[in-house]
Every structure is written in structure tokens, then in C-alpha cells.
Image: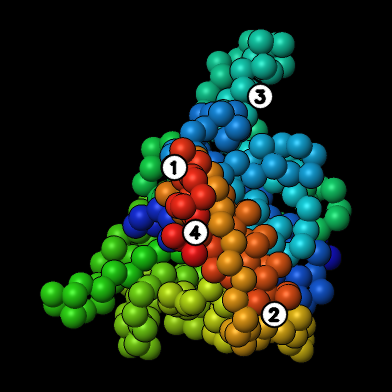
Amino acid sequence: METKYIFVTGGVVSSIGKGIISSSIACLLKARGFRVTIQKFDPYLNVDPGTLNPYEHGECYVTVDGHEADLDLGHYERFTDIKTTRANNITSGRIYQAVIDKERRGDYLGKTVQVIPHVTDEIKRRIKQLGLSGKFDFIITEIGGTVGDIESLPFLESVRQLRWEMGQNSLCVHLTYVPFIHAAKELKTKPTQHSVKKLQELGIQPDVLVLRTEHEIPADVRRKIALFCNVMPEAVVQSPDVPTIYEVPIVMHRQHFDEIILRKTGLPVEGQPHMQPWLDFLAKMHCAEKEVKIALVGKYVELQDAYKSIDESLLQAATYNDRRLRLTDIHSERVDDRNVESRF
């Protein structure tokens, strides 16, 4: 089969879980027997996250080939058991560096080098690079930042062009936030409507909307969003808060998310994804009664994502050994025997 491309974009606010949704899509498709990989395109001008302060960007995830990458690649690997490389994480810095190197070599034959087509062509080349290997049925591409960010525009323009070039072999999943106003006790859909409108202004019509929410979104509200955003009602799904990120693929599957993707990319929907190992893991996590206490000593323990892979490794190790993890964070500059004992 021809390689299918899924583009995941986000709106309203950052940090609402594009990486988890991308990972969940990959998890469900892989469970259906498809060969899948995920790539992250970040709009910042750093060549890679290796020199970024943890206060700026959380942990730096190191891939199997030694590349220093975005922490979302850790989620990709944990959700799919795939191995990522430097080809799975591209920044604006790497794109512009490649374009400038070509210009210095004379590859553009003296032409005026511009964002369109030269920068966008380089982005498109990187997006299609993994697909051209013939190793994958689906390439999931997460675009960092939010719709409306000026630094994301070249990436979104590249997505717009690829959507026209690829036709049914591509689709766009747009993740957006539906806030609950406690004073009014109402869910507000306007932020989502404006986010989608901004995406449409850039020439991209989302095929699927994933609504990030802290409260259940009633069916009539989802139909309203579908109407105003020009999306089929069945292609509007919600991603509510759950006790653990590992429940997200299950929540998505219950709403037929994977089936929607298959239909929109012209593939038959046959059977169910093989999710039993995933369900067994969740059962172990929820049923564990014995507790294991571990102290994590580090300089950046007050940051939630600074040691994300260590935290997740400890959680999974505890779960597979039928234990509930009780993780205590201790700042490296304030550690002593009495401090550790008091925290336990």
C-alpha cells in the first residue's frame, strides 16, 4: 500500500497533548498490524534540544543513534515500541541550516532563496523522507506549537501543499482545547472555532477534531463544533482527563478514532486492534496493592518534564512487577539523610 501521512496540529494553547494523541494514533494503528512511525517538527531555531535549558523545554530525549531530541519522542517509543532516530525530530534550525548550506554551495544556481519554495520544499522533503524508505504504512507528523504562531507558518504551509499533492493519502487531525468556565458552569466552543478558522485561513481543512477537555462534552455540543468547523459529526472526538496517559489509546478507540482514520485514508476497517497486552498493563497498574518507594534526586525535580523518561521507566517497572510506585522528588542541593527519611 502507498504510505499514508497523518498531520497532527494544535490550537488555542500549547501543552494540551499533541504528543500523546500522536502516540495514541500510532499505538492503535500498530495494533491493527500497520507499520507506523512518528516524527516531530519543532518551530524553534535551535538545531536540536541538546543545548536547551530544562526550564525551557523539559528533558532532552536521546534516540538510538545518539541524537538529542524532543521529549515527545520518548512518548512515541513508549506507546509503540518503535526505535526513533534523528530523522524523527526536525527543528526550524536544522531546516534553515540545510537551506543556507545549499545556498552557499550554489545548489540554487543563483536564484533568490525564499521561504516559499525553498524552505517549504526542504520541510516537505524531510516529512516524506521516512515514507520514501518503504518501511512504513503510516507516517504521523506532529507539528509543534499552535496554529497562529508566526514561527510555525512555514510548516503549516508545507502541510497545506502536501495535502493537495497527496490527496486521500493524507489527513489532518487538529487537537484543540474546550475550556470549562466555572463561574458560568459552561463549556465554551469559541476557542476551538477560532482555532479551526485560523487553520482554514492557512488553507488547511482538518479532517478530524480531537477536543481536549476536563469535563465531558455532550453530543449536542460536539455536533455544534462539527457544524461550525466544517467537520463530520462522527469525526469530532473528545480527549478528557484520565488517571494515566496510557488510558488515552483506549479512550480514543472507544470513540472509533482508528476506524475514522482508516476510512478517511481509503482503507477498509477490518476487525479490532490487538490491544490485550495494553489492557493487561492497565489492569496491572490499577490492581497493584503493594507499594514501592523510590526517591529521585536531581537538580530540576520541581519541573514536571525534566526527568520524564526516568519517571515513566520507574512507573512501568513497578507496574510489571505488580507494585504501585510512590516516587519522591528530592532536590540535589538539599539532600541529606534526615531529608530523605522525612520524605518517606
Name the kind of residue labelled 2 in the image.
Asp
Q: Quadrant of the N terminus?
A: bottom right
Name the residue that disc number 2 marks: 322
Name the kind of residue labelled 1 in the image.
Arg
Of marks 1 and 2, which one's residue comes earlier in the chain?
2
Q: Is residue 21 left or right of residue 1?
A: left
CB of mark 4 within 8 Å of CB of mark 3?
A: no
Whether residue 181 is visible: yes
CB of mark 4 within 8 Å of CB of mark 1?
A: no
CB of mark 4 within 8 Å of CB of mark 2?
A: no
Instruction: Give the spatial CA distance, label 4 vs label 2.
Output: 25 Å
Q: Secondary structure at mark 2?
A: loop
Instruction: Give the spatial CA distance, label 1 vs label 2.
Output: 32 Å
Instruction: Give the spatial CA distance, label 2 vs label 3.
Output: 49 Å
Name the residue that disc number 4 marks: 341
Of marks 2 and 3, which one's residue comes earlier in the chain?
3
Instruction: Give the spatial CA distance, label 4 vs label 3.
Output: 53 Å
* Disc number for residue 334: 1
Name the residue that disc number 3 marks: 98
The image position of residue 327, as x and y in percent, is 54, 63
Residue 233 vs 50, above or below: the answer is below
Name the kind of residue labelled 4 in the image.
Glu
Q: Nearer the viewer, mark 4 or mark 3?
A: 4
Q: Secondary structure at mark 4?
A: helix
Q: Nearer the viewer, mark 4 or mark 1?
A: 4
